[in-house]
Amino acid sequence: ETILFNDTVAYNISYGNPDATPEEIERCARYAHAHEFIIKLEHGYNTIVGPQGKMLSGGERQRIAIARAILTNPSVLILDEATSALDSQAEKLVQKALEEVMTGRTVFAVAHRLSTVANFDRIIVMDHGRIVEEGIPSVLLEQNGLYRKLYDIQFGL
């Protein structure tokens, strides 16, 4: 669940860095592929998003949160089901935004959608709370284990 506050888009992006300039906020929104929908909102960056950001779609809320992460520039980023509730178009935009924010940092991601972690350096596959496989995606595919089984199911192979 993406956490947004009943405040402006700009406030929600700058939450982790309240001294951010409007230019920095916009730059991060552009990296997160959020600027395009933000400028279409009635008041742009000054639009109130409503309680929990409910006036925005799930993909829009996630891109606002990604812009916030870019602005705070953490050395470690934790993602929990970052694309689980998105349609395929929103997922592609969020994936592209995540690629931007993950560069040069350590990322831990919990994901059932393998497309979320397909480009990760290392994947740990768990089954019923146990680690059953670990490695890079291409090697995991060759091993024909649980990762391969899930991959085939998700990608219709």
Image: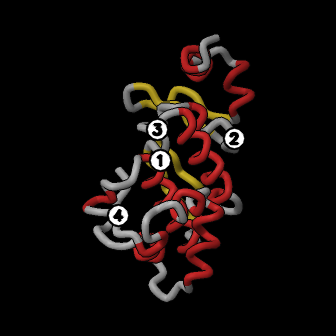
Question: How far is disc 3 from disc 4 in space, using C-alphas?
Answer: 19 Å
Which dot, 2 or 3, sits closer to the camera? 3
Quadrant position of the C terminus in the picture = top right
Q: Position of residue 61 (x, y in %)?
A: 43, 55
Q: Nearer the viewer, residue 100 or 33?
A: 33
For the residues labelled 1 and 3, say whether their Cβ atoms are less than 8 Å apart. Answer: yes
Residue 82 at x, y percent in the picture: 48, 46
Can you tell which of label 1 and label 2 is closer to the viewer?
1
Label 2 Cα crowd, 10 Å radius (few <14 / some 14-19 / many 20+):
few
Instruction: Judge by depth and name the residue closer to the eye, 55 or 100.
Output: 55
> Residue drawn at (64%, 64%), measured in percent from left and top?
30
Q: Residue 86 carries which label?
A: 3
Q: Which residue is drawn at 46% across and 62% down?
A: 41
Q: Residue at x 49, y 88 (%)?
A: 19
**Which residue corresponds to mark 2?**
119
Q: On screen, 140 above or below 96?
A: above
Q: How far, Cα to Cα, is label 1 from label 4?
A: 14 Å
Inspect the image, locate mark 3, and give the three-letter code of the amino acid beneath it.
Answer: Leu
Q: Mark 1 points at which residue?
A: 59
